[in-house]
Image: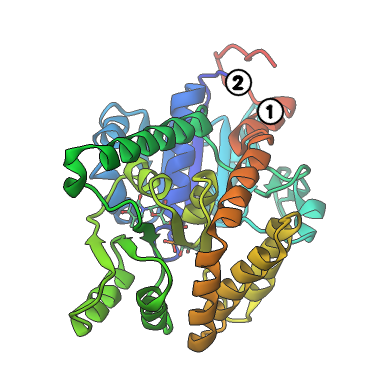
Amino acid sequence: MISAAWRADLFCRVVDNLGDAGVCWRLARQLVQEHGCQVRLVIDDPAALQQFVAVDPADMALLDHGQIVLAPWTVTDPADLVIETFGCDVPAPYAEALAQRAPQPVWYNLEYLSAEDWVLGCHGLPSPHPRLPVSRQFFFPGFVNGTGGLLREAGLLQAVAASQAASAADLCRATLTADRQARMPPEDLQVALFCYAHPVLDQLLAAIEAGPCRVHCRVFQGPAQQQVQAWAAAHPGHRTRFTWLPWLGQAAFDQVLWDSDFNLVRGEDSFVRAQWAAKPFFWDIYPQSDDAHLVKMAAFLRLYRADLPDLEAAQALGALWQAWVRREGAALAVAWAAVCRHLPALQAKASAWQAQLGQQPDLLTQLLTDAVGRGLSGPGLARPPR
Ligand code: TRH
């Protein structure tokens, strides 16, 4: 662990939804909790944090104790470490102050996550300022060595394993004792659903209803929850059981993914958390106007399925993702049934993939190691050991 008392400025522009704020909040929290940084989260729409920060007392404490300070986009006094996320560009007066500051802050542009090959060539490249004598570094998250890795808090994998072992033991006890009725029937497949409102979501629900597994579906807040509720109301005899989740803090959000057998996730942050959950999943990738998301999804699938020994399982998973993204309702039903049949192989893959990703140093460790190499230091602060 690199420990420090650096001041870090994290810049976040909320484009839409929750992911921009979600990634930044996780990063801010990790900078504080694992690296002793004082973090200023410069965010143009702090309301985007409301839903998941305000409901978690531990997260609120970080704000109440001033360990994470929310700041408007007008700040002009740069910290020791500056991270702008997703190409959001710091304000011009801030960049000017940054160029003049001695010692000069270490400045990163933390980019979007992609499994595409070009990421390897771009990660770590400098991006000189067009006007000022200062340069920032591109920092690309990724799944393979040579990229910046993924956000992963210290002890995360151990926490996932302990939690999953405990619920497996609980379930086992519940099937053996009289409190069985209070619990999920063990034959129910636990599905967590966090997707965008989607044209074939109704068909997916119909496929789940008709599929080989009986499902208990926990549906996160958001427009998809309303869509699923409308579907459930229109199908009063449905056998699928639904739980409508309230807004959860990120820790509780993660826990739902850990506790499920299959996760439907979206965007970027929940996509990563599903991989740490080590459960089969499918990705409602954020749609882009030029269909760039299709290329991005194909790159991830190529990597994820590369060493899946069970070819039929690999095909089933790919067919499900493709049917969803291409909005092919009929293919979706076939693919869902196939995925259910191949769940053991897909579960084994999800566990192996999590372990493989866990070999990489986490994103923040990589970023701070790089920053220390570039002379990250704070005025009056001891330079930390390397
Ligand atoms: O919300 P997303 O779709 O986010 C994004 C943004 O749209 C962004 O503009 C785009 O660039 C990016 O996708 C690709 O999905 P994501 O990334 O999974 O973020 C959701 C966050 O919300 C995640 O941090 C988990 C959090 N969350 C909770 O903590 N509790 C909840 O109850 C819910 C529903 C979400």
* Residue 74 seen in this snapshot: no
Q: In the image, residue 231 lies at what x, y percent?
A: 26, 80
- Residue at horizontal 46%, vertical 46%? 24
In which quadrant of the rendered image does the N terminus lie? top right
Q: In the image, residue 108 lies at what x, y percent?
A: 64, 43
Image side of residue 268 versus residue 299, left or right: left
Image side of residue 277 versus residue 229, left or right: right
> Circle 1 is placed at which residue position?
369
Element carrying mark 1: helix
Instruction: Give residue 189's quadrant in the image.
Output: bottom left
- Residue at horizontal 29%, vertical 69%? 240
Image side of residue 86 versus residue 242, left or right: right
* Kind of residue at badge 1: Thr
In which quadrant of the rendered image does the C terminus lie? top right
* Residue 165 seen in this snapshot: yes
Q: How is the image coloured?
A: rainbow
Q: In the image, residue 68 lies at what x, y percent?
A: 37, 34
Compare residues 152 and 276 and report the one nearer the observer. 276
> Circle 2 is placed at which residue position?
2
Q: Residues within 10 Å of mark 2 (few under 14, many from 20)?
A: some
- Residue at horizontal 74%, vertical 51%? 127
Circles 1 and 2 in contact, beta carbons < 8 Å: yes
- Where is 299 relative to 2, above or below? below
Element carrying mark 2: loop
* Kind of residue at badge 2: Ile
